[in-house]
Amino acid sequence: QVQLVESGGGLVQPGGSLRLACVTSGRTFSTYTTAWFRQSPGNERQFVAAFHFSGANTLYADFVKGRFAISRPDAMYLQMNNLKPEDTANYYCAAKKYGSTSRSYIDYDYWGQGTQVTVSS
């Protein structure tokens, strides 16, 4: 069983930055394709970014538009810059064994509990 734990959320003003982190207990991510999703009340879980297990490619949602960057030097990170109020959501880390990057949440088998990001002045 893969356990994922997110951290780094919080309250930030519009235009500010946050760096989210996702760690897995007792394992490394080297054989897992991993991703960030987000969900706000009343909305479906939305794809944000994904990182291929090999490190060969990353995938981003269109709304990211160069503001966010996913990386995985050890843990998985999501650097979020120029945050907007509409980025307010609970952000989730997800993983699946091997496989290609995917925008669909149903393709991922393991999930963290989420970390809340609130963008407000």
Image (cartoon, rainbow, N blue to C red):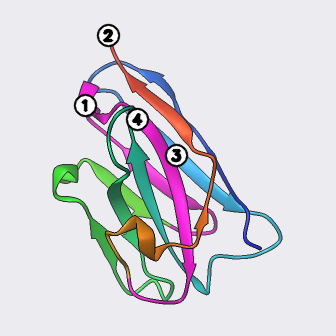
Question: Mark 3 against mark 1, which lies toward the viewer?
Answer: 1
Q: Which mark is residue 86?
A: 1
- Queried whether the magenta region covers residue 92, the answer comes back as yes
> In the drawing, does residue 84 fall left or right of residue 120?
left
SS label for mark 2: loop
SS label for mark 3: strand
The answer to which quarter of the image holds residue 62 is bottom left
Q: CA distance from mark 4 to mark 3?
A: 13 Å
Question: Mark 2 against mark 4, which lies toward the viewer?
Answer: 4
Which residue occupies 34% across, 48% down? 44
- Residue type at the position of mark 1: Glu
Residue 62 against residue 44 in the figure, above or below: below
Quarter containing the C terminus: top left
Which residue occupies 40% across, 43% down? 39
List the residue tagged with mark 4. 89
Residue 1 against residue 60 in the figure, above or below: below
Sequence-earlier tag: 3 or 1: 3
Sequence-earlier tag: 2 or 4: 4
Q: Position of residue 61 (x, y in %)?
A: 23, 60
What residue range appears in magenta? 72-100
Q: Which mark is residue 121?
A: 2
Residue 39 against residue 58 in the figure, above or below: above
- Residue type at the position of mark 3: Leu
Say few, some or many: other residues with alpha carbon within 10 Å of mark 2 (under 14 / 14 to 19 / 20 or more): few
> Can the viewer see residue 84?
no
List the residue tagged with mark 3. 20
